[in-house]
Image (tube, helix red, strand yellow):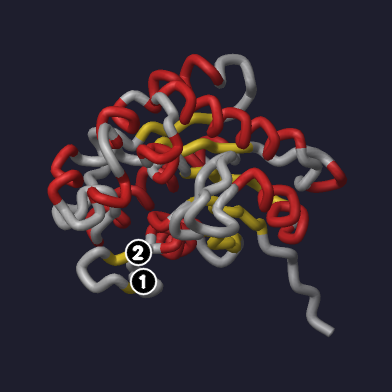
Amino acid sequence: MQNRAEKKRIVCFGDSNTWGFDASTGGRFPEGIRWTTLLQEHLGEEYQIVEEGLPGRTAVLDDPLLEGMNGSAYLQPCLMSHSPLELVIIMLGTNDAKERFGLTSYNIAQGIAKLSLKAKQLLSGHNGLNSPVLVVVPPPIGPEYAKTPIGKSMGKDCDDKTEHLASHLTELLQESGIELLDSKGKVPMNRIDYMHLDEEGHELLAKLVFNKVKTILGDG
């Protein structure tokens, strides 16, 4: 029997922008457009990207209107079921900005930091060790979102809350050993609901994450 090497697995843990929501159709972008599948292409056959995106997911909050959205509750079984892992990538925060949760921008960053620290403490790496963790700060929600149909559900000030996530996370994750990648100013949201990636956004994010991953894993 031919020996086959185990692929190096990377879990991408996120929300609808990791799942690949297409605001123009209400459906899902296909493979080859989603940033996760583009990342797979960039990394090559040696790697396996595990897409763990759930529309509506929050970092640490239970949503009173949507069941099963608390990322913290699902993180451990998710990571351990895919172990051993080379890397865990977390990209959350957009849904946490919803007005019904009543969080400040700093509170949202606290939740993401708590989740990422939990991911780092889990023994999901090789030989029962920890996996490296990369937190990707999503692009800020555009202020125009409030005038779109999604504005009623999201509520007020979501754009302002997401605008400042990176600075808060930089402070909170200092000396944690967790890597941070800010996509603000590098990756745009779409011009439909202003809170999801379009095809260009997925392509740009994939390249941005790929370059960071290469550095983290010592390939850059």
**x and y percent of residue 59 in the render?**
54, 41
Is residue 170 positioned above or below 218 on the image?
above
Residue under the point 70% across and 35% down:
118
Disc 1 residue type?
Arg
Circle on res. 21: 2
Badges 1 and 2: C-beta atoms under 8 Å apart? yes
Pick the residue in front: 168 or 104. Answer: 104
For the residues labelled 1 and 2, the Cα–Cα distance comes to 5 Å
Q: Secondary structure at mark 1?
A: strand
- In this figure, which residue is indicated by the disc labeled 1? 28
Disc 2 residue type?
Phe
Q: Does 149 sit left or right of 26 as displayed?
A: left
Instruction: Count up the numbered dots.
Output: 2
**Closer to the N terminus: mark 1 or mark 2?**
2
Q: Does 77 sit left or right of 39 as displayed?
A: right
Residue under the point 47% across and 44% down:
91
**x and y percent of residue 53 in the render?**
50, 58
**x and y percent of residue 43 in the render?**
50, 57
Pick the residue in front: 75 or 5. Answer: 75
Residue under the point 44% across and 62% down:
19
Q: Where, by quadrant of the figure, is residue 81 drawn? A: bottom right
- Whether residue 7 is visible to the viewer of this picture, yes or no, is yes
Q: Residues within 10 Å of mark 1 (few under 14, many from 20)?
A: some
